Image (tube, rainbow, N blue to C red):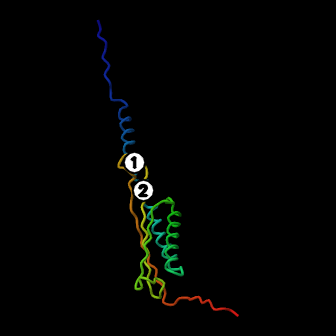
């Protein structure tokens, strides 16, 4: 009487399965890192452009109060141009030297700091109660010339 041959399970094909699973397990974090780096880079370009635009808008405004409003609007527009969401937090801080309360005086130097935040993509709230974010800020300095054009409202007659 012949004994039935026991079939032994070979290793054929298991390397392919292991390679596929290992590839998937390594590919997902690498894709997340690449997407996150691109998101942070987009935010950095946006904040840099926002600081430059806000500085120019502030310097070209006729008064400090209107300059602050124009600077904030220009910063929001620059961030929007780079694809950041409209509800992205943005803080525009304007300082000037040597005349801290009159930035549009001759020989004044205006410094604009724009700070914002970029949320990193593809992470659920389950991992920590909120999407992780990356804080960004940029500074731009604009000198005001000593000689300025002054408009006069002289009546023409």
Residue 72 placement (x, y as % from top left): 49, 70
> Looking at the figure, which quarter contains the N terminus?
top left
Q: Tell me the CA gap for discs 2 and 1.
A: 12 Å
Q: What residue is disc 2 on?
A: 119
Residue at point 43% right, 82% down? 101
Examine the image and state in which quarter residue 134 appears. Answer: bottom left
Residue at point 36% right, 47% down? 127
Residue 53 placement (x, y as % from top left): 50, 72
Residue at point 37% right, 50% down? 129
Q: Is residue 50 above or below residue 119?
A: below
* Direction from residue 68 to residue 133 in the image, left or right: left
* Direction from residue 71 to residue 133 in the image, left or right: left
Residue at point 39% right, 42% down? 24
Q: Is residue 79 above or below residue 10?
A: below
* Direction from residue 48 to residue 5 in the image, left or right: left
Examine the image and state in which quarter residue 151 appears. Answer: bottom right
The label shown at residue 125 is 1
Q: Nearer the viewer, residue 7 or 116?
A: 116
Secondary structure at badge 1 equals helix
């Amino acid at each position: 009487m012949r004994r039935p041959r026991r079939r032994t399970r070979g290793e054929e094909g298991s390397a392919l399965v292991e390679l596929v699973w290992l590839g998937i397990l390594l590919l997902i974090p690498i894709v997340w890192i690449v997407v996150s780096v691109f998101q942070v880079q987009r935010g950095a370009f946006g904040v840099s452009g926002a600081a430059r635009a806000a500085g120019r808008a502030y310097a070209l405004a006729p008064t400090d109060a209107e300059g602050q409003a124009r600077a904030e609007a220009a910063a929001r527009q620059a961030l929007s141009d780079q694809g950041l969401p409209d509800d992205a937090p943005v803080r525009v801080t304007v300082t000037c030297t040597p005349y801290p309360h009159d930035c549009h005086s001759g020989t004044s130097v205006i410094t604009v700091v724009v700070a914002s935040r970029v949320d990193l993509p593809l992470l659920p709230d389950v991992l920590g109660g909120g999407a992780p974010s990356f804080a960004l800020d940029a500074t731009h300095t604009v000198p005001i010339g000593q000689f300025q054009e002054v408009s006069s409202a002289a009546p023409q007659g």
